[in-house]
Image: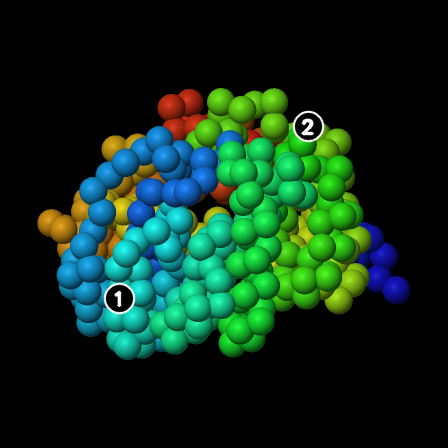
Amino acid sequence: MMNKMNLQEIKTTHMKQLAEYRRELQKKPMLKKLFLELTLRCNQKCLHCGSSCGDRFSDELTFDQYKSFLNKVKNDFDISEIQLCITGGEPLLRDDFFEIMNYANDLGYSWGMTSNATLIDDKKAELLEKSGMKTISVSIDGLRETHDNFRRSPGGFDKAISGIKALLKNGSFENVQVTTVVHKNNINQLDELFELMTDLNVDSWRIINIDPIGRARSNKDLLLDADEYRYILDYIRDKRRFCLPVSYGCSHYLGLDYEREVRDWYFLCSAGIYVASIHANGDISACLDIEPRKELLYGNILKDDFTEIWNNKFEIYRSNLSDLTPKCADCPDKDFCNGGSYHTWDYDKNEPLMCFKNILF
């Protein structure tokens, strides 16, 4: 049996290789995921929402504007290498949702969606199948009362479970995933949620911690402490022995003990090197979880050339965050971490809002 030292040596070798690969990507990025924020409208008002949906309103791109943009991307990129990631707000609130997605499907795009599933029934699941949806991630953030309170949506839990059942009943989707944001009020419900996911027979369960962004900054009583972070990761590592695929989200460098143990590969924040996003009003950014600050928006698809921007902008994502702050200077893991996830970087102080050093490693 491989001992812990040998395993950590292997992980270190892998992460050094990944750090070198990241540096190459920063020189020559590859668009792999293109997020479309179809709307900021939402029928829930979640306490953690990174986009503060319901509080923020903007003009929305029209169907014709999406058609033009999707045609341009197809003309300029190999779309067989790109997945459209559809999000909001709640995307299904758009009356022309299926017009947009049918058009994308006809062009040959592969796409998946993030949804609260409260608007999905058997008919909607059938329409999602016909429009080419491959994957969907549905939010379940605790048992009934906890979920509804967290999402400020009475009846939201039952509607979401009904939507999940309709998707699974349809049987045509590659991955019906549930995502759970763990916070102070639901961390003690993970075992019951695991049983629920198993009973539902979802394809995968993704667990992430609440991050200090968006509305969560105003709800700091929901944020976790060091012991709770370790508990979540130990829980995921243990549950990955079972049939139901359980994983931690893509965010945050976790140190040698947890990297590759709680998700399928090592940490790499892909904002601006694999990932670009189009906001509901057409603004261009790297990742929708990143605060839409003026300096982090790179034009708008209604007046700027997206391909030119992808090829030549996104400068901060194509350099090393860890070089910007003395807090990272002496950290032996800085090449692996690169300053952490871009959505939890403090762009005013040029330092991480969230770092697991001295918590996990």
**Horizontal arrangement in the rendering, residue 175 relative to residue 182 (left or right):** left
Q: Position of residue 314 (x, y in %)?
A: 30, 46
Q: Are marks 1 and 2 in contact (CB under 8 Å)?
A: no
- Near mark 1 (Cα within 10 A), the count class, few <14, some 14-19 or many ≥20, is some
| Secondary structure of residue under mark 1 | helix
Q: Residue furthest right?
A: 1
In this view of the protein, which residue sits in the foreground, 222 or 196?
196
| Residue 327 in view | yes
**Horizontal arrangement in the rendering, residue 209 relative to residue 298 (left or right):** right
Q: Which residue is mark 1?
A: 99
In this view of the protein, which residue sits in the foreground, 259 or 50?
50
Q: Position of residue 291 (x, y in %)?
A: 37, 35
Q: Which residue is mark 2?
A: 225
Q: Earlier in the sequence, mark 1 or mark 2?
A: 1
Residue drawn 58% across the image and 46% down it: 157
**Horizontal arrangement in the rendering, residue 203 relative to residue 51 (left or right):** right
